[in-house]
Amino acid sequence: MKDVLLFTDVNGIAGWGRYGGSYKVATELRKAGFTVQTIDVFGEWTVDELKLLIDKFVDKNTLYVGFSNSLMVKQPTDKDYPTACVGTNIEPISHAYAQMFSQPDSIMWDLFKYIKNKGTKIVVGGAKAGYSQSFEEVDYWVVGEGDVSAVTLAQSFKTGKEFKTVDTKLLLETDYPYLDCEHSEIIWDKSDLLFPREALPIEFSRGCPFRCSFCRAPNIGRKRGTRSVRHEVLREQLFRNYENFGTVDYMVSDSLTNETPEKIINLHKAITSLPFKLELSAHFRLDLLSKNKFERELIEEMGVKVAFFGIETFHTEASKIIGKNFTREKAIENLNFLKEGWKNKVRIRASFIVGLPAEPEKSIWETFKWCTSKDCPLDGFSFYPLSVGDPDRFGLKTSLFDASPEKFGIRKLRYRVPAKFWEWETDQMTYSRALNICKEMAKELTEHNPISETFLGRIVNLGYSLEDIINRKYDSKEFGPRRRKLIEAYKHNLIHGE
């Protein structure tokens, strides 16, 4: 039996991969002396299998059963994966909030009652915990970062020590902040059942010093150069993963990898001192690279194979509104500079938003035409409609567009339930038109784009090298059975293992 049972999932994405946040919470609990069993691919288990796992790991001494719902969405079908994997799944990001877990609500009610009959508590955390607390069986909701809250709850349930809540059930990140990012790490346990050479998520730093108007990521607007992992801690973590699992492929979870030159220099120093080579996919900001051109070589040398840029727009006024302040000419000049240096050693991908205030439709189609031209330095790209939601109750995941749309010339028209986003209009466009533009683009993008950088590590985990699949289209007939085989192996090991 375990002190804590933790369910997690990343079910809206093809391939195989883990959500780092869940395993970071497991790490903090284990460091505090608690036994933890993680259970992944939550949406892939039958009700009977889930009850079997609960019977195996939970009894009256178990402190709580946790659910990490950040990347849980309605269980997709096989036909959903090809568009997702090449960046043509153009549903707004907030559609993920339409369902709290990767199992239907009816199953969750049944499961929660089964857990409560064991005499233990239920805790839910993750990105969606702050938006709705609609399941009365849940004892506590962790809102925001859970590194400290998860441990606080376990200690309290064990010792009876009181802890602070809001509305009796909510633990807020602001009350239980994580202050030790310098030593942040995921220590993967044997019981996590990693596969040999599995590509893993990794965190170099947390949050972002910028506050782009459309962005609702957590920890944005923080001081630049803070909340970064010390390079000696990072090096130790990379070496440990290589020795224990043979891992060299990583999906970097940082919102921004190149926030300062010092960060890139320290990462380069830590990574290039290793006796093995890494292969990384990571997010960068183009305007910062244009100011620090020497970073181009360092990024390649430290093993980045896919560099992703959230450019969002080439329209000068729209770029200023969102906080990018880039012109079309300057952006293209810098993308060409990167391509000239990297050639095909580092693949370049970019995303764009359709419907930003001030940008007319003509400008969007000009950008799309450039992206699909032979001279374009991008190896892949994505277009998504602007997403506008309501501010979350605690302001932890709220964009400036969400908070004050009228300030930016955005007018809310109709609220979409249960997807929890607004149809909108500006002087230039409506949400419906933005969505249709993206659908028109998607027809061509599906044929044009290779597998998106977000998913490469997950496809590598199906038994490929990065070079095998970096320019490939998504092939459901080939990848689907490999994914199913991996999931069944994981389930078998967890059910029949010690």
Image: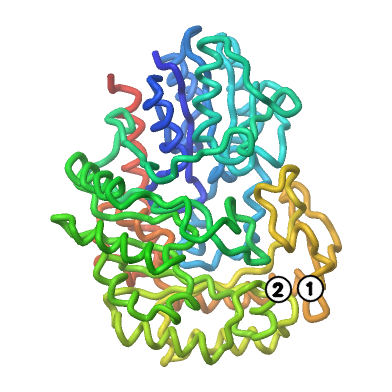
Instruction: Name the residue tied to disc 2.
Output: 434
Q: Residue at image x 39%, y 56%?
A: 252
Task: Name the quadrant containing residue 308.
Answer: bottom left
CB under 8 Å between discs 1 and 2: yes
Q: Is residue 461 visible?
A: no
Q: Residue at image x 62%, y 63%?
A: 211
Q: Residues within 10 Å of mark 1 (few under 14, many from 20)?
A: some
Label 1: element kind: loop
Label 2: element kind: helix
Q: Residue at image x 79%, y 81%?
A: 428
Q: Position of residue 139 (x, y in %)?
A: 65, 21
**Above or below 203: residue 344:** below
Task: Name the quadrant containing residue 215.
Answer: bottom right
**Above or below 433: residue 124:** above
**Amino acid type, mark 1:** Thr
Identify the mark at residue 430; answer none if there is no mark: 1
Q: Position of residue 48 (x, y in %)?
A: 49, 22
Q: Nearer the viewer, residue 427 or 385?
A: 427
